[in-house]
Image: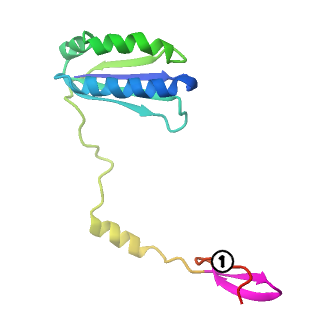
Amino acid sequence: MILINIKMQIRPEKMDQWLALADAYAKDVNSEEGCLFFQFARSLTDENEFICIEGFKDANAGGAHVKQPYVKKFFEAAPDLVATQPQIIYIDTPHDGFGPMGEIQPRLAAEHDRRASAQPKPTRRRIPIFANGRDHVQPSSGPCTLGAT
């Protein structure tokens, strides 16, 4: 498998064009026979940064990929949309795709419920409300209506 990650900084004023191009491109690439996965991920800390995550069966599949007409279209359009030169990581690996991560597994519903029930229940505070010269006590989780008698 070949694994490719490309970091791209997009011009903010070109974001709508980028999103349309990236969406169409990802759909086209994912339809390729040799494509194992292809997606763009947006940074959580920089809304203009995207990472392209690509996996192809082998170098032959990657070679077939770059010969597709939509790849040429993408490469022609992208220079007008990127703010800096994209940075790439290319790895030829013996893996054949994603595998299970040992450190994290979903909790079973019963275990999740047991953990949740072990947590202390929050107490409701009562907040004094002063209106019309009188002291009203209102539960903090309910609606507050000033001036009620």
Q: Position of residue 122 (x, y in %)?
A: 53, 76
Above or below residue 86? Residue 120 is: below
Q: In which quarter of the image is the N terminus?
A: top left
Q: Position of residue 111 (x, y in %)?
A: 30, 67
What segment is highlighted magenta in the picture? 125-139
Q: In which quarter of the image is the C terminus?
A: bottom right
Please give left or right for residue 27 compared with residue 33 in the image.
right
| Residue 137 is inside the magenta segment | yes
Q: Which amino acid does label 1 sit on?
A: Cys
Of 49 and 18, the residue lying toward us: 18
Of 139 and 100, the residue lying toward us: 139
Please give left or right for residue 122 compared with residue 65 in the image.
right
Using the rendered view, name the quadrant where residue 33 is placed.
Answer: top left
| Residue 89 is inside the magenta segment | no
Residue that badge 1 annotates: 144
Q: Where is residue 78 in the image (x, y as percent from the top left)?
A: 44, 15
Above or below residue 106? Residue 1 is: above
Q: Where is residue 62 in the image (x, y as percent from the top left)?
A: 24, 15
